[in-house]
Image: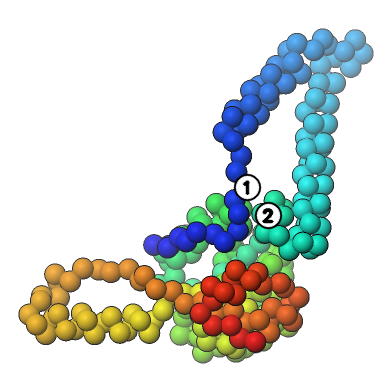
Amino acid sequence: MIETTTSPFPTIRVRPWLGRLAIAGSLIATFMALVWAPTDAVQGDVYRIIYVHVPLAWLAYLAFFVVFIASLGWLWTKRPWFDALAVASAEVGVLLNPANPMNEPIVPAMKNTGETLNIRLHQIAARVDDATFDSVFTEMGTKRVEAFVVLDDPMLIAMAPVVAKRALAERLPSCGWPEFAESGGLIAYGIDFVSLYRHAATLVHKVLNGTTPAELPVERATRFFMVINRQTADTLGLHVPDVLLTRADQVIE
């Protein structure tokens, strides 16, 4: 399960009637272009293609213009509203050990979440025999990955300093566990295992007092830990919003 929290960035709300108006306008325009407009005396019906590709081209140019202006507004004012307005599709990688069966339910859940955020997720497999992760970062470059997440795995945890250093050299923002951020990764976000281990003592206490283990409920994690490596962010030329810095449990300067 993926826990969701309220986003610190504002949501640009569009009134429902605007969507209905757009659909009605599209249907009317389609009717006028393909039925109502008279046939051209020279070109026949072929000319009707201009009623399709010209509006689409105008719409594409308008979208590029809005993103351009909003991006300038973000760089100038640092207001999250401009960043939300200029949101575009992003290519994000997930670095994992394909031999670990624990990753099977995680990747589909991440892909579903990525689709709602207009993020395309690429699954990048790490091999034990690739100590320098050359093939991993070559694949990321081929797929134009702009950032990546490292899933918890004993092999990847042991190689955290190598992955973090290589990500910094390739100027790729990365996300993993707390030790990964301490090794040079940009950010870490995940379950607070310390509190989880402490809570395990409560379960042991219940068993010792006579509770049957089968009667103990399965509990989801409720506490999460976030670490931000500000030094890595400065090296990558990234501005970390103050709202994230204040929410972080640890900031590495």
Query: What residue do we see at 59% from left, 71% from top?
Result: 244
Q: Identify residue for label 1.
A: 12
Quadrant for residue 246, please give it: bottom right
Asked if one can make out residue 47 in the rendered structure from this viewpoint, the answer is yes
**For numbered disc 2, what is the local secondary structure?**
helix
Q: Nearer the viewer, residue 239 or 183?
A: 239
The residue lying at 46 percent from left, 85 percent from top is 154
Q: Quadrant of residue 233?
A: bottom right
Instruction: Identify which amino acid the numbered label 1 is placed on.
Output: Ile
Residue 158: give x, y in percent of width and height: 51, 89
Give the residue at mark 2. Answer: 81
Q: Which of the pair 57/3 is nearer the observer? A: 3
Q: Quadrant of the C terminus?
A: bottom right
Crowding near pointer 1: few (<14 within 10 Å), some, many (20+)? few
First in sequence: mark 2 or mark 1? 1
Q: Residue at position x 51%, y 83% from top?
A: 178
Query: Which residue does the image show at 26% across and 82% down from the upper left?
Result: 200
The image shows residue 128, relative to residue 145, as above or below, that is below
Specify how the rendered protein is coloured: rainbow
Determine the residue located farthest toward the left in the rendered image: 210
For the image shown, how many numbered marks are present on the structure?
A: 2
